[in-house]
Structures are given as structure tokens and as C-alpha cells.
Image (tube, grey):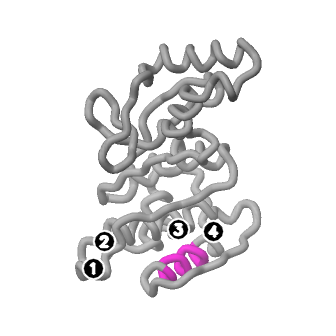
Amino acid sequence: MLSSLDILGPEGRIAARLDNYEHRPQQLEMSAAVSAALADGHHLVVEAGTGVGKSFSYLVPAILAVTDTEAPEDEKIRRIVISTHTITLQEQLLNKDLPLLNSVIPREFSAVLVKGRGNYISLRRLESAVRRQENLFDRQADLDELDRIQAEHGIMGLELGPDGRLVFADGLANDVVRVDPSEGRYIERAK
């Protein structure tokens, strides 16, 4: 059975992959605590200083837990959610840490980024704004922006489906779409 030690240890898969890998006993200690918490289904709060390798300490046991094919069906962990406070850490996890771990852990896994709610717009509220635009906006620039959003993203005339959610022309129902705040553009529908 594959363990965190097999990945993070001084003779582990990362050490074999990276010439400058530095073994960190605190990293293995934290990783063991995370593994135990996942296995026992209990909460864990860990405080660790800079340089301990916290990301790998929680990612490795999380990946091993989710990809464990030997666990009984009723004890399998299907999904792990990792919440970060900074975009910088999100980018580190997705662009650096997870790709490296994907290359050294011989199990298939995937990761998905879900950004904070400030990066999404409710289509229901947008439709409401369209219906009430004359009462909501005083400035012509705001009305023009609403028109631009409608024209660019084809959301004019959306209807509520039987479940009360907005229905797109392709028949898919979604309440929100993701927005790239740097460009103010819709990127994709949230699932």
C-alpha cells in the first residue's frame, strides 16, 4: 500500500525525481496527522511555519485517500475540497504542486479550481436587472454595459425552467456563470 512516506520520505518518489529535494521530518509528521484524520473521519487543525512543506503535507494524503482502491466501498473518500486564502497559493497548487504529484504518484487523479463567489454572477439576478434596468440604473454608461453583456453573451430572453433555474438555448440549466473579473467576461457556466 502506497503511503506518504513513499512519496515524501528521504528515499521517496519526489526525492528520486528532484535533485534538490530536501527531506523535512515535520512534513512527514503533518502528513501522517492528515492521513490519520482522513482515515478516522475527524477534523484536524495544524499550524506549521514557513518551509515545512504544508502543501505536500495535505495534498499527498488527500490524493492517496481519494485514489485508494482497497478501501471498502462505504468508506471510500470520493472528493477532497481544499480551500485557500490566496490566489497565489491556488496557482501554486494547480500549476506546480499538483502536476509534480501527478507525475510521481502512480494513481490517476484530477483537480478542479473553483474560484470564490466574487468571480461568479447569478443569471437569475442578471435577468432581474434586465427587467428592472430603468429603475436600477441612473447612468447611461451602466445601461450600455448591461446591453453589452447581453449582446456579447447571448443571455437575452432566457427563460426559467420547471425547476426555477434559467435555461440556456442548448437546454442546460444553470444558475450562475463564471466571470473573469480582470476582463469582465463570462468564461463558463458553473456546474
Residue at 48%, 14% (x, y): give it.
151
User: What is the three-letter code of the residue carrying label 4?
Assistant: Arg
Query: Extreme bottom residue here?
Result: 40
Q: Nearer the viewer, mark 2 or mark 4?
A: 2
Whether residues under marks 3 and 2 lie with C-beta atoms below 8 angstroms apart, the answer is no
Based on the picture, tell me whether residue 127 belongs to the magenta stretch. no
Query: Which residue in the structure is indicated by mark 2?
Result: 68
Res. 71 mark: 1
In the image, the segment drawn in magenta is 28-37
Could you tell me how far apart the alpha carbons at marks 1 and 3 are, in whole angstroms? 27 Å
Residue 24 is labelled as 4
| Distance CA(mark 4)–CA(mark 1) | 28 Å
Check if mark 2's residue and mark 4's residue have beta carbons within 8 Å: no
**Closer-to-camera residue (157/20):** 157
Amino acid at circle 1: Ala
Majority secondary structure in the magenta region: helix
Residue that badge 3 annotates: 10
Q: Residue at x 30, y 27 (%)?
A: 169
Mark in front: 3 vs 2: 2
Vertical relation: 165 (above or below) 74: above
User: Disc 4 vs disc 3: Cβ atoms closer than 8 Å?
Assistant: no
- Which one is in front in this view, the residue at disc 4 or the one at disc 1? 1
Q: Residue at x 55, y 61 (%)?
A: 56
Three-letter amino acid code at the position of disc 3: Pro
What kind of residue is marked 2?
Answer: Asp
The first of marks 4 and 1 along the sequence is 4
Quadrant location of the N terminus? bottom left
Mark 2, residues whose alpha carbon is within 10 Å: few (<14), some, or many (≥20)? some
Front one among 40 and 156: 156
